[in-house]
C-alpha cells in the first residue's frame, strides 16, 4: 500500500472526489461516472498483472516474486470458485 501511495504521489495522481449519494439509487448514466474497484479476486489479479511496475521500484519486490504470487493466488481463486460460499450453502444446501 505504501508503494501504491508513493506511486500516486510520484505520478501526481488526484484521487476521485467523494460522492454523497446513495449508490443503489443512481441512474445508469450516473452510475457509469463512478469508478469501481475490482469485484472479484480474479479481477484484482488481472488489474495487478496489468499495472505492477510501482511494486518493482526500489527493489522491494522482484518480477519472479510477483509472478509466483500471482500464480499462487490464481490457483486459490480457482479452488474457491469450485465451492459454494457460506451464503450459497445457507440458501441452497442447508436444510
Image: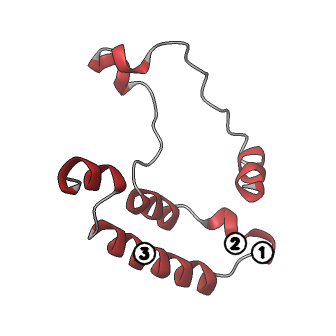
Q: Are marks 2 and 1 in contact (CB under 8 Å)?
A: yes
Disc 3 target residue: 76
Q: Quadrant of residue 80?
A: bottom left
Position of residue 37 measured from the top left corner of the image (x, y, whole percent): 48, 43
Give the CA distance from mark 2 to mark 3.
24 Å
Looking at the image, tell me whether mark 2 or mark 3 is earlier in sequence order: 2
Q: Nearer the viewer, mark 1 or mark 3?
A: 3
* 27 vs 82: above or below: above
Q: Is residue 48 above or below residue 76?
A: above
Q: Which residue is mark 1?
A: 60
Q: Secondary structure at mark 1?
A: loop
Q: How many marks?
A: 3
68 up-or-down from 15: above or below: below
Which quadrant would the N terminus be assigned to in this image? Answer: bottom right
Name the secondary structure under disc 3: helix
C-alpha gap between disc 2 and disc 1: 6 Å
Q: Tag 2: Cα neighbours inside 10 Å, few (<14), some, or many (≥20)? A: few
Q: Residue at x 46, y 58 (%)?
A: 44
Other-residue count near label 3 (Cα within 10 Å), few / some / many at <14 / 14–19 / ≥20: few
Helix, strand or loop at label 2? It is helix
**Disc 1/disc 3 C-alpha distance (Å):** 24 Å
Relative horizontal placement of residue 34, taking residue 89 as reference (left or right): right
Q: Position of residue 53 (x, y in %)?
A: 63, 66
The type of colouring in the image is secondary structure
For this orientation, the residue located farthest to the front is 95
Q: Residue 13: which quarter of the image?
A: top right
Q: Nearer the viewer, mark 2 or mark 1?
A: 1
Identity of the residue drawn at 47% across and 74% down? 73
Residue 17, numbered label: none
Residue at which label 2 appears = 56
Amino acid at each position: 500500500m505504501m508503494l501504491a501511495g508513493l506511486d500516486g504521489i510520484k505520478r501526481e495522481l488526484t484521487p476521485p472526489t467523494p460522492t454523497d449519494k446513495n449508490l443503489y439509487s443512481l441512474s445508469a448514466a450516473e452510475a457509469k461516472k463512478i469508478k469501481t474497484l475490482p469485484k472479484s479476486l480474479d479481477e484484482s489479479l488481472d488489474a495487478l498483472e496489468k499495472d505492477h511496475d510501482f511494486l518493482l521500484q526500489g527493489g522491494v519486490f522482484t518480477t519472479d516474486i510477483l509472478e509466483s504470487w500471482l500464480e499462487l493466488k490464481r490457483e486459490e481463486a480457482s479452488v474457491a470458485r469450485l465451492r459454494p460460499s457460506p451464503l450459497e450453502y445457507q440458501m441452497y444446501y442447508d436444510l
